[in-house]
Image (tube, rainbow, N blue to C red):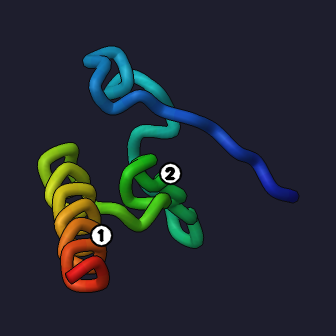
Amino acid sequence: MGLKMHSLDLTDISAMNSPYYYLQPNDYIYIKPLKQKSWGTGTTGISSLGTIITLISLVTTTIVLLTR
């Protein structure tokens, strides 16, 4: 029968009326990763902010230790 791809917005209530809402045997589900997750900096904005603060702290500590 071939490959068919369909996109559903599960945040929209009308998605339940779609014939593709219910899974059938041999169906595959692909979920796009979050942008923060694909960058590897964290899963949320707060997690990303924590990573950035940690990097700034590391650089600052390194500079202070090397200049003394």
What is the number of callouts on the image? Answer: 2
43 left or right of 46 in image: right
Cα–Cα span, label 2 and label 1: 33 Å
Residue type for callout 1: Val
- Residue found at x 20% / y 74%: 64
Q: Is disc 1 placed on a helix, strand or loop?
A: helix
Q: Which residue is mark 1?
A: 59
Question: Vertically, is 63 above or below 52?
Answer: below
Question: Vertically, is 15 above or below 48?
Answer: above
Q: Is disc 2 placed on a helix, strand or loop?
A: loop
Q: Quadrant of the C terminus?
A: bottom left
Q: In the image, which disc is placed on residue 14?
A: none
Q: Quadrant of the N terminus?
A: bottom right
Judging depth in this view, the residue of 39 and 29 nearest the camera is: 39
31 left or right of 53 in image: right
Earlier in the chain: of badge 2 and badge 1, it is: 2
Question: Vertically, is 24 above or below 10?
Answer: below
In the rendered image, residue 65, in percent from the top left (x then y), is placed at 21, 84
Q: Quadrant of residue 14?
A: top left
- Residue found at x 57% / y 35%: 7
In the rendered image, residue 40, in percent from the top left (x then y), is placed at 41, 67
Q: Which residue is mark 2?
A: 32
Mark 1 surroundings: few (<14), some (14-19) or many (≥20) residues within 10 A = few
Residue type for callout 2: Lys
Q: Nearer the viewer, mark 2 or mark 1?
A: 1
